[in-house]
Image (cartoon, rainbow, N blue to C red):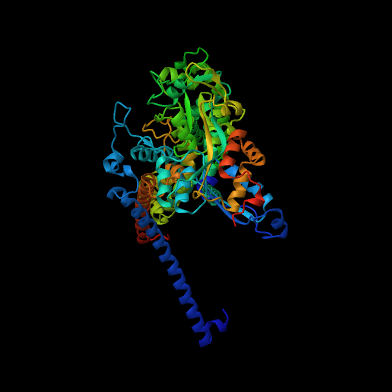
Amino acid sequence: MPTRFSTVIILLGLLMWPMTGAMAHTWGDPVVGNLDSIGSDTMAGLMLRWGERLEQRYPAVRLQLQANGSATAPPALAEGTTRLGPMSRRMTASEREMFEASHGYPPTEIPVAMDALAVFVNRHNPLGKLTMTQLDAIFSDTLRCGAETSIERWDDLDRPELAGPIDRHSRNSVSGSYGVFRRDALCGGNFRVDVNEHPGSSSVVAAVAATIGGIGYSGIGYVTSAVRPLALQEGDGPAVMPSERTTLNGEYPLSRTLYLYVNLPPGESLPPVERAFIDLVLSPAGQDSVRESGFIPLPESVIAAVRQALGLNVPWGHVSPR
Amino acid sequence: MTERSLSPSPWRRRFRYVRDRLFTLAVTACGIGVILAVLAIGVFLVVEVVPLFTGSASTANSDAIDIESLWLPQQYPGYDEPQYRWQANAATDADTPMFSLTPLAWGTLKAAVYALLFAVPLALGAAIHSACFMSRRLRFRIKPVIELMEALPGVVIGFIAGLVLAPYVERHLVGVFALVLVLPLGILAAGIIQARLPWCLSKRVPLGWAGLWLIPWLAGLVALTLGISPYLEVLWFDGDMRTWMDQQLGLDYATRNAMVVGLAMGFAVIPTIYSLAEDALAGVPASLSEGAQALGASQWQTLWKVLLPAASPGIFSAVMIGAGRAVGETMIVLMATGNTALMTLSPLDGMRSMAANIAIELPEAAPGGVHYQLLLLCALLLFVFTFCVNTLAELVRSRLTQRYQRLGGTT
């Protein structure tokens, strides 16, 4: 079984020399102990990289990671089994209510990275761009984005060089990518029944690469040279290719933010271990890990604002509340 | 044996007695433990599923779930006609999810039926040949090899089927369809030729060793068929059969379809059916077939009138156990189909089976929610189905053993 089906518990770092003198005199507060994380499968690799970097900085910390999917984070946060919940989408209203019902205050939402959903076709397909209405007409049968009729075959696009049936590929219905695509590309409508559902993003890419009439979507980090990403056009606007720049300036229509949810009572500051982790995530080194994992780093201004809100700009030695 | 072991000292005898009792106890405890574990799984599933129907599920839209909504077509907003739809969505609160178990049950059975369509003729044919006609030396080597196929993990078969076989079949449609015709005819032709050969030649290719000398013959046929199929494709189908089917017949060919699943899962089921059916046939008491042949029946008559009727319960149970495996198989269906919850009979369309659905969605379903409970309901249905099928097969098989013993066999 692929790892995403079983509970993946990754123990990072060994408790090698806890409380070594070297640690204590570098930082005001000892950063020691376990950090639990339960949530997104998309972000598993990214969390792992951050965990490795954290361990390099503080050998006495270990990150325990369970990556079963974004939907597992809110219950775990509400029940208090974890204090970190990575999610590849925003919490829904009902998930927020569940957290508030058990803690009395809302969860703290920290954006940590951006991701663009690329729509791609087989590399032999000459198609260069699609409008958002056409995209909806290809993938949905509810046509909420304003198309008159469904696009059943490539011939329906009225391009002489395109013909034949369309092979549609998607992620499975519980993944964050599926939810984002459904909300932003299908205007909240439903997928057609004959859309193939794949358990992983790389599986979508492989399937589109193998079929000449294939079309699919995945996070931009998964796109290989065997498929060709399409430019997307909203209304009468320009057709936009997915890239770091177009995602950050909001021109590309299918983008999402990846979040880290933490349980932070109002008026209190983060415990040392979580503080060290989030400080790392929102540092240049942490954002390098984002790029290495195939996601898009947050813009500087957003990082500065988030750090400000969390009180992370103060040098370490001075914040110890004790 | 030495004298000491024939009359051991009283102390030693007592020690052996206690050791035997302890061991018996341990074995019994393990057996009971296994039975309890199976029961506990059933009870767990039932307990988790019951709130779905009593309405005490934690999520608000639980009142929409009853037997009717799970199995009959439902009217959803945005559609003209009632639909069978399975579309769970954990990511948004906006729409009501669509939970219909009918397409999942359909997909499960469709995958199993196509697998059995491929596996049963091959496995039973192989079992009959190796039990009745094959030379003993070859049989003792071939049987373990086929049974070794059973050890292949489903993930491996599914991986090969989804990423190697499916694209290959799509590119070589004409060749694959031609093979379906050519291989059985080729085997028949080989039989006819073998029977017409003069004695000096046919003794070199005896029937008992057909398993070996057919291999180069069939390999040659496969190479020939695949070799000329591109020319046939140009000649008959304008160079691309998929486009031709699409334009002339209106058939849409999905890359990951029931045909590929049938092939891959059939491959996984063949060893089970073959092994059980072969045991049943080989276990038919020799007195029966010898009696028939003594009365002048030919080998063929003995097979049809004596061996097959005598072993039919065993063959039936072999097919049942194969069907049970095909219904419960997860990874092959998950990886070799597109998991499209369609309800068509066509071998060129995909499907979504219950087991694959559980594997895909359970990791992200919130425990205690309606979606989670529905997935466990699927699990319960699968559990009940395979439990019944396997029990039935075992009952039939144990009666067969009794019958053989009455007839004086050794099995």
Depicted A141 relative to depicted B149: above or below: above
Q: Position of residue A305 (x, y in %)?
A: 58, 37
Q: Position of residue B214 (x, y in %)?
A: 55, 38
Depicted A35 relative to depicted B341: above or below: below
- Residue A107 visible at all: yes
Rendered image quadrant of residue A298? top right
Quarter of the C terminus of chain B within the rendering: bottom left
Rendered image quadrant of residue B211? top right
In front here: B327 or B281? B327
| B64 left or right of B350 in image | left
| B102 left or right of A248 in image | left
Give the residue at the far right of this rendering: A22
| B74 left or right of A294 in image | left
Which residue sits at x=41%, y=40%?
A: A93
In front here: A120 or A261? A261
How many numbered marks does the figure carry? 0
Quarter of the N terminus of chain B within the rendering: bottom right
- Residue B129 visible at all: no
Depicted B345 relative to depicted A262: above or below: above
Q: Position of residue B397 (x, y in %)?
A: 37, 55
Which residue sits at x=37%, y=56%?
A: B44
Rendered image quadrant of residue B82? top left
Q: Position of residue A65 (x, y in %)?
A: 56, 50
Give the residue at the far top of this rendering: A160
